[in-house]
Image: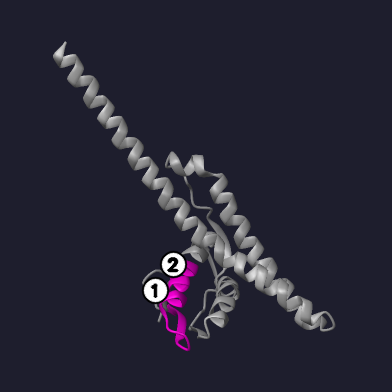
Amino acid sequence: DHTHEQEIRKNIEDALEIARSANAAKSSFLSNMSHDIRTPMNVIVGLSNLMKYELKNPEKMLEYIEKIQTSSSHLLGLINDVLDMSKIESGETRLHIEKFNLIEQINEINTLILQQVAEHGQRFDTFTSGICHEYVEGDALRVRQVFINILDNAVKYTKRGGKITFTVTEEKSSSESCAKYRFVIT
C-alpha cells in the first residue's frame, strides 16, 4: 500500500509541475502577444485620429489609409496566430513560407514604428544598402514580428530625443541560390 501511495503522490506532483509549466508558457505567450498587438493598434488609433484633421487633404488621407491597411494586415496576422493557439500548444506551428518583397516589408515595419517614435520624441532612420535581391522566400509575418519586437524595445529603452537606426544590407553570398542579409538596429 505504501509503495502505491508514493506512486500516486509522485504522479500528482508530476502532473502539478506539468500544469505549472503550461501555465507559465501561456502567460509568457499572452504577454508577448499583447506586446505585439499593441504596436499596430497604436498606429491604427493614432492615424485614425490624425485623419480628422486632414479631411480636405486627399494625398495625406491616402497616405494614412495605406498605413492603416498595413497595420491592420499585420494585426490580423497576429490575431490569426492567437486563434491558432492549439497548434502552438501542440508544437505544430508552421512557418508560412512565401515569396515577399523585402523592401516593402521594411517599409511596413517603418510604418508600424514611426508612430511610436514620434510619440517618444525620437528620431528613426532606415538605411538599405546593396539590395540586389528584393524578393525573398520566408515567413513575412514572422520576419515583421521579430524586427518590430526589437524596434519596440529600442523605442522603449532609448531616451526621449534619442536616435534609432535600422540598417539592412545585402552582403556577398557564397551560394548563387541564396542571398545573405545583415540587419542592424542601433
Report the quarter where the N terminus lies: top left
Q: Is residue 152 magenta?
A: yes
Give coordinates of residue 5: x percent, y percent.
20, 17
Q: Is residue 167 magenta?
A: yes
User: Which residue of the protein is positioned furthest toward the right in this rendering?
Assistant: 56
Which of the colour schemes (rainbow, by chain, secondary structure, one colour) is used?
A: one colour
Q: Secondary structure at mark 1?
A: loop
Say whether disc 2 or disc 1 marks the residue closer to the N-terminus.
1
Q: Secondary structure at mark 2?
A: loop
Q: Is residue 119 above or below residue 36?
A: below
Q: CA distance from mark 2 to mark 1?
A: 7 Å
Mark carried by residue 31: none
- Name the residue rendered at 43%, 70% in the picture: 150
Given residues 156 and 129, the one toward you in this image is: 156
Q: Which residues are magenta?
A: 147-170
Instruction: Tell me the kind of residue under disc 1.
Output: Ser
Numbered badge on residue 173: 1
Q: Is 159 in front, or is 90?
A: 159
- Residue tagged by mark 2? 178
The image quadrant of residue 110 is bottom right
Q: Residues within 10 Å of mark 2 (few under 14, many from 20)?
A: few
- Of residue 150 and residue 127, the one placed in the foreground of this image is 150
Res 139 seen here: no
Residue 112 is situated, as x and y percent measured from the top left of the image, at: 58, 72
- Marks 1 and 2: in contact by CB < 8 Å? yes
Locate residue 158, reporting x and y percent. Answer: 42, 81
Q: Which residue is at a point 41% across and 77% down the rendered structure image? A: 157
Decide: is 114 above or below 41. below
| Residue occupying the far bottom of the picture | 161
Residue drawn at the location 46% of the way across and 83% of the way down: 165
